[in-house]
Amino acid sequence: MKSATGTILIIALSGFLMGFDGSLFTGAVLFVKGQFGLGEMQLGWTVSSHTLSATLSIFMAGLLADRVGRRTVLRIAALTFALSAVVAACATSFAMLIVARLLSGLGVGFVLVAAPMYIAELSPPALRGRMVTITQLFIVLGIFLASASNLLVIRFEQLSQDNWRWMLGIGVVPALIYLFATLFVPESPRWHAMHGRMEAARRILARVRGASAADREIAEVCASLGRDTRQEDARLEDLWAPELRRVLIIGLVVGVVQQITGINSVLAYATMIFTQASGAADGIEVSFVQTLFITLVNVVFTVFALLLIDRAGRRPLMLFGTAGIAISLAVTTLGFHLSGGAVHSTWVLAGLLGFVASFALSLGPGMWVLFSEIFPNRVRGLAISCVGVVNSTVCFLAQLVFPWQMQHLGGARTFLIYTVFAVLGLALLARILPETRGRSLEELEESLVRHS
């Protein structure tokens, strides 16, 4: 089990890489806007282009992960993150900056699909939720350290002339470190089994769980694959088979609800939100400190999710957290409605802290745990890609229009819209969410798919 934990930790570090690289732009956005003279929609495009390419790569990642392996896809992600950091730091035009953002987004999609798949396929059922959540923990750690890095750059006067270049360029360091770390992990045993390499799969499982457990698990995987007579690669039309409709609908609803409440808009534009809420009276540095506080709360409550997800279960945690999201967004709406003083900006801060905490406890890690569990072995990569594309598309649209919403609708109306979406999402999740805790992937396939 120690060997499995070490391997899972290395794979989960891809989440740190993704969170760190993606969040460096949160601090740079204020300076990039002035550097290139960007309007509201241009600013929205600069931020959301990252999500657009992530949407495309999410769709490709599942197919690639099934064809060339989960580990190989993560190595490709590390290379794209390194390249994007170099291009961003050297950007001399708006177009060049967009290219860097698109490259970074490709890496995000690869990590979001390949890392949870690998970890779910290697983890024992009793710890699978916790193990998959480790990736989310590393993501939020990366976000937190990116915010800390941005704050340090702000405080170094020597870097003030090109501070945004330093903010973005530092992303090359963790990318190269992670690429080196992947040299020390094997490929997923279930991927080997899917390609008929049973001996390689058994050898890896025996090393991480012991010979008897490996034999038992290989027998379950073989039985699962043997029940499906279609041995060719999964195709899009396979996802519309009657027996898969239930899990596909669950995946689509969870994917939409996770992003339609605006979490990635809040994280991407946090410094801008706090500047607007306080009327810029406290200066830019204070907005960076408040953003750092938001990301710290994100880390703390992701740790709580890590500890609770295999004890409390997926369904209770996600329902409780979504209710908290709705309440917190309502508080944020009230804070903007009463804006005009420090007390009211404090309401905005309190509401956003509650929002991020509730998300980190539930939909943040819970969605990817659920995605890695509910789909059958043969179509898992393709299915996660498809629902991930929907999730990322909603994120792209939310980030694209957010600066326009804040400028023309105001903070109160913008967050009221998110509050309504959260309430509707809670009602839907209460109706359709299953509990998947403590069951093997093959048992879940039997109950959620074959009995549908």
Image (spheres, rainbow, N blue to C red):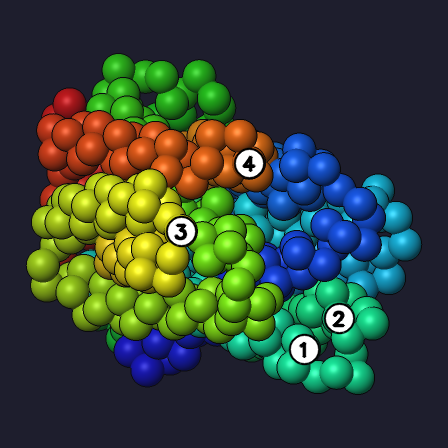
Mark 1 or 3: in front is 3
Disc 1 and disc 2 in contact, CB within 8 angstroms: yes
N-terminal-most mark, 4 or 2: 2
Using the image, tell me which numbered label, if any, was put on residue 407: 4
Across and down, in percent, residue 127 comes to 21, 65
Name which residue type carries label 3: Gly
Cα separation, mark 1 vs mark 3, equals 30 Å
| Element carrying mark 4 | helix
Q: Quadrant of residue 305?
A: bottom left
- Where does the image place residue 239, in percent across and percent down from the top left? 38, 22
Residue 340's disc number: 3
Mark 1, residue position: 153
Question: Residue extending furthest front?
Answer: 340
Q: Which numbered disc flags the more N-terminal residue, 4 or 3?
A: 3
Given residues 118 and 328, the one toward you in this image is 328
CA distance separating discs 1 and 2: 6 Å
Which one is closest to the eye, mark 4 or mark 2?
A: 4
Q: Which residue does the numbered mark 2 point to in the structure image?
A: 163
Q: Which mark is residue 86?
A: none
Residue 161 quadrant: bottom right
Disc 1 residue crowd, few under 14, some 14–19, many 20+, Cα 10 Å: many
Say whether residue 142 is visible. no
Spot occupied by residue 326 in the image (x, y as percentages of width and height): 22, 42
- As measured in the structure, the alpha-carbon distance from the residue carrying label 4 to the one carrying label 1 is 28 Å
Query: Could you tell me how far apart the alpha carbons at marks 2 and 3 are, in whole angstroms?
Result: 31 Å
Q: In what element is the residue under mark 3? A: loop
Give the amino acid type for the residue marked by disc 2 in the picture: Asn
Q: In this rendering, which labeled residue sits more in front, label 4 or label 1?
A: 4
Badge 1 element: helix
Task: Give the answer, above or below, for where 318 lies relative to 229.
Answer: below
Q: Amino acid at mark 1?
A: Val
